[in-house]
Image: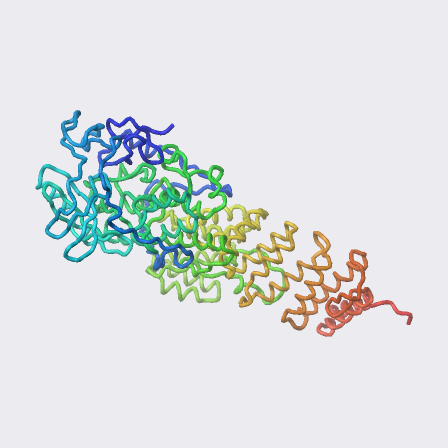
């Protein structure tokens, strides 16, 4: 059941954030009732993603005590060059002018008591407040001797909005009322109070040109932006494509980052307040902007978009970001009960198929709109970094083209650096995981960099221990010491004590979970490690590394379907993480899907140091008889792979031996029929020829060995050679 409109005297109910009678969104103020506060704080935080995971919430009873690290997002263009969005032609300004500007009767309410009003002007029958819904400005009126009024174009919460023309600078402008009063002095005060907005200058925020008085009214003079709001676009087109919607929101986060650095909060963000013009977006309504440190300022918000704590503690940076997350959700989904049952929550993946299909996107939205403000993104830059990662993943999935990027939080895949110089099969190990990058602002940064370069593990631990004593406030020294203890092994108690100290100071530092998961992997506790990495995925939904870690832990725990899902996301987004290719292939082989396993390994780029090793694995998979017999195509393809591999010596002979042994087995068991038209490593697919070829390979291997190994290879060559009459 939809809730009743909270405006006094209104009998309507809220549908998708708006009243079906007065048509207005809820206007929150600093005097919100205690009854309303209960509705803000009484919701459940239990959510489950399509993978069956739930995020950690309320990690401590306190609040965050550390400042968030500033991000380094690039938002130089809409969609960061990943999405092509057709330009929207600019609207001819004077076509927006209303020929008969009137406020519909069902939207006429007293600004003082919210009593329904029937006439266009008069006095409220309930409180006696004088009112008028008739435009106070007319065409050709001249405001402040500079701005010529063209006509009314819309009606807002503070009265009519007008199109005007700046005769001095020859440009169209918009006039928006600040206060409609019988007192000219009050209008002057309202103008003075908002003049701080004139200092706001950003490419994605509507320009504020001036503030003027006209009789008993105050007006803000703004840039004219010709285009369509996302609300209009959403209404005309329905649900927006995922990549397009993300591109709009990612771009506008730059405007929020700017406002927040200026000590301002936007307060009332929603699809109505972001306009697409040409190939860019802008915030177009600055009426609700206020200073963060202004405890007496009015609080504007809209039901379904406003964060639950706003009425109690006022708007903040994270409550602003909450509205951004809710807006993105609205662009992508039809959320039933947006202003009621889902006023502070998102539909489950069972309710909304998109959330089941886009795991990273759903986790992003869950973090952006978390009940506890401390569980959300703490800065617009941090939010933009993660959203860009989600966008890369979405575009890679939609286009089939990888969209790799250098992470600002993690180093690269360590498998190419840690893999042994042999061709034994690669298994999932904790030391393949990327390591978080060092925070350059940490007080012990230089010392930790130098200590980390020490190759001897015991000496490195000794050095890092000294650094933690010298810099007790350094989280980097503690965390790198913890990482080195994991590599050494057998230091669980000391390791956990270090992580607990870091966690006591900042329970929201995702690196605690990362190193704890790494430690659990090293201890053979894969299922517990999976839970730790799962929470890192909630904290960093746009990063590749947590998904790789989840894949490795899930594989070690025997959860192959989930591992396949995570490895697949990583590989589609960035094939440079070759651990994902080898891991995906292993899991697919385990699931008896060798052909897809080969496809996974074929995504290892030729530039990778493990490319040859991936081709060796392909040959092994094609010739494997563990789960099913290979066929003619597999045998021929394996032979082609071996012939193409740049291998010499024993490794080449071992692989050739495997292929020829498989071919001989298939012929002798009659799984394949002999034929001279097919050759395998230069030998016709006939028993005698294959035996001769295999004998030659075995004797070549014997020449490269000594002792017992040499004798065994010679004996084996004698056993496989064709029988003769002599």
| Residue at (73% x, 54% y) in the render | 629
Q: In which quarter of the image is the C terminus?
A: bottom right
Q: Nearer the viewer, residue 131 or 651?
A: 131
Q: How is this picture coloured?
A: rainbow
Q: Quadrant of the rendered structure where residue 638 is?
A: bottom right
Q: Which residue lies furthest to the right in this view?
A: 725
Q: Residue furthest bottom?
A: 703
> In x, y percent, where is residue 560?
59, 48
Position in image of residue 41 (x %, y %): 33, 34
Q: Residue 113, image x and y in percent? A: 19, 29
Which residue appears at 23% of the width and 28% of the height? Answer: 116
Q: Can residue 40 be seen in this view?
A: yes
The answer to whether residue 194 is left or right of residue 507 is left
- Depth check: give the residue in front, 495 or 721: 721
Q: Is residue 288 toward the left or the right of residue 353 in the image? A: left
- Residue sticking out furthest to the top: 126
Along the line of sight, the residue nearer the viewer: 112 or 49 = 112
* Quarter of the image with the N terminus in it: top left
Q: Residue at x 20, y 55 (%)?
A: 171
- Residue 139's quadrant in the figure? top left
Q: How many marks?
A: 0
352 to 657, vertically: above or below: above
Q: In this view, does 449 lie above or below 518?
A: below
Residue sitting at 12 percent across and 42 percent down? 187
Q: In this view, does 517 lie to the left or right of 81?
A: right
Residue 72 shows in this picture: no
What is the quadrant of residue 367 in the picture? top left
Residue 705 image offset from top left, x and y in percent: 71, 72
Please tell me whether residue 125 is drawn above or below residue 645 in the rendered image: above
Q: Could you say which is closer to the camera, residue 493 or residue 216?
A: 216
């Amino acid at each position: 059941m939809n809730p009743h409109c909270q405006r006094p005297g209104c009998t309507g109910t809220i549908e998708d954030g708006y009243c079906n009678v007065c048509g207005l969104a809820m206007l929150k103020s600093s005097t919100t009732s205690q009854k309303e506060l209960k509705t803000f704080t009484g919701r459940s935080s239990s959510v489950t993603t399509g993978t069956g995971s739930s995020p950690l919430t309320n990690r401590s009873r306190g609040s965050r005590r550390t400042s968030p690290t500033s991000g380094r997002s690039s938002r130089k263009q809409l969609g960061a060059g990943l999405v092509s969005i057709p330009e929207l032609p600019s609207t001819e300004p004077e076509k927006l002018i209303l020929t008969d500007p009137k406020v519909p009767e069902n939207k006429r309410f007293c600004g003082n008591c919210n009593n329904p009003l029937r006439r266009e002007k008069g006095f409220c029958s309930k409180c006696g407040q004088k009112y008028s819904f008739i435009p106070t400005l007319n065409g050709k009126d001249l405001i402040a001797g500079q701005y010529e009024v063209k006509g009314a174009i819309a009606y807002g919460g503070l009265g009519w909005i007008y199109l005007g023309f700046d005769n001095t600078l020859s440009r169209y402008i918009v006039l928006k009322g600040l206060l409609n009063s019988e007192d000219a002095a009050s209008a002057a005060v309202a103008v003075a109070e908002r003049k701080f907005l004139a200092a706001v200058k950003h490419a994605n925020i509507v320009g504020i040109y001036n503030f003027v008085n006209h009789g008993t009214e105050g007006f803000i003079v703004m840039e004219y932006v010709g285009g369509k709001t996302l609300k209009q676009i959403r209404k005309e087109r329905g649900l927006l494509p995922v990549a397009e919607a993300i591109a709009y929101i990612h771009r506008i986060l730059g405007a929020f980052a700017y406002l927040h650095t200026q000590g301002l909060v936007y307060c009332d963000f929603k699809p109505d307040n972001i306009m697409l013009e040409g190939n860019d977006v802008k915030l177009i309504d600055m009426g609700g902007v206020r200073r963060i440190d202004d405890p007496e300022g009015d609080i504007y918000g809209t039901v379904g978009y406003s964060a639950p704590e706003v009425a109690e503690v006022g708007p903040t940076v994270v409550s602003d970001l909450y509205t951004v997350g809710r807006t993105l959700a609205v662009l992508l989904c039809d959320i039933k009960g947006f202003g009621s049952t889902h006023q502070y929550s998102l539909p489950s993946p069972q309710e909304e198929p998109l959330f089941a299909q886009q795991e990273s996107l759903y986790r992003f939205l869950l973090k952006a709109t978390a009940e506890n403000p401390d569980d959300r993104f703490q800065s617009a830059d941090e939010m933009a970094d993660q959203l860009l990662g989600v966008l890369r993943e979405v575009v890679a999935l939609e286009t089939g083209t990888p969209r790799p990027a250098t992470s600002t939080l993690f180093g690269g895949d360590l498998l190419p650096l840690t893999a042994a110089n042999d061709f034994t099969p690669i298994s999932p190990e904790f030391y393949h995981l990327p390591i978080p990058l060092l925070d350059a602002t940490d007080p012990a940064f230089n010392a930790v960099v130098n200590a980390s370069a020490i190759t001897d593990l015991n000496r490195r631990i000794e050095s890092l221990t000294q650094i933690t004593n010298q810099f007790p406030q350094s989280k980097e020294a503690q965390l790198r010491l913890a990482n080195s203890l994991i590599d050494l092994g057998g230091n669980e108690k000391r390791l956990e004590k270090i992580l607990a100290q870091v966690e006591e100071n900042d329970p929201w530092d995702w690196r605690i979970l990362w190193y704890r998961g790494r430690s659990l992997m090293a201890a053979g506790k894969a299922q517990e490690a999976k839970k730790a990495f799962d929470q890192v995925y909630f904290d960093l939904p746009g990063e590749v590394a947590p998904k790789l870690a989840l894949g490795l832990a899930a594989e070690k725990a025997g959860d192959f379907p989930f591992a396949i899902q995570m490895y697949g996301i990583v590989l589609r987004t960035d094939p440079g993480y070759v651990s994902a290719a080898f891991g995906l292939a292993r899991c697919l082989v385990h699931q008896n899907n060798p052909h897809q396993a080969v496809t996974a390994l074929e995504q290892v780029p030729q530039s990778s140091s493990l490319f040859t090793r991936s081709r060796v694995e392909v040959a092994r998979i094609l010739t494997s008889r563990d789960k099913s017999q290979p066929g003619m195509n597999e045998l021929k393809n394996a032979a082609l792979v071996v012939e193409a591999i740049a291998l010499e010596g024993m490794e080449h002979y071992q692989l050739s031996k495997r292929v020829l042994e498989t071919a001989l087995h298939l012929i002798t068991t009659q799984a394949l029929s002999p034929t001279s038209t097919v050759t395998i490593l230069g030998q016709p697919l006939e028993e005698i020829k294959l035996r001769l070829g295999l004998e030659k390979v075995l004797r070549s291997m014997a020449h490269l060995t000594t002792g017992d190994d040499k004798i065994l290879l010679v004996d084996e060559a004698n056993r496989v050679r064709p029988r003769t009459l002599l």
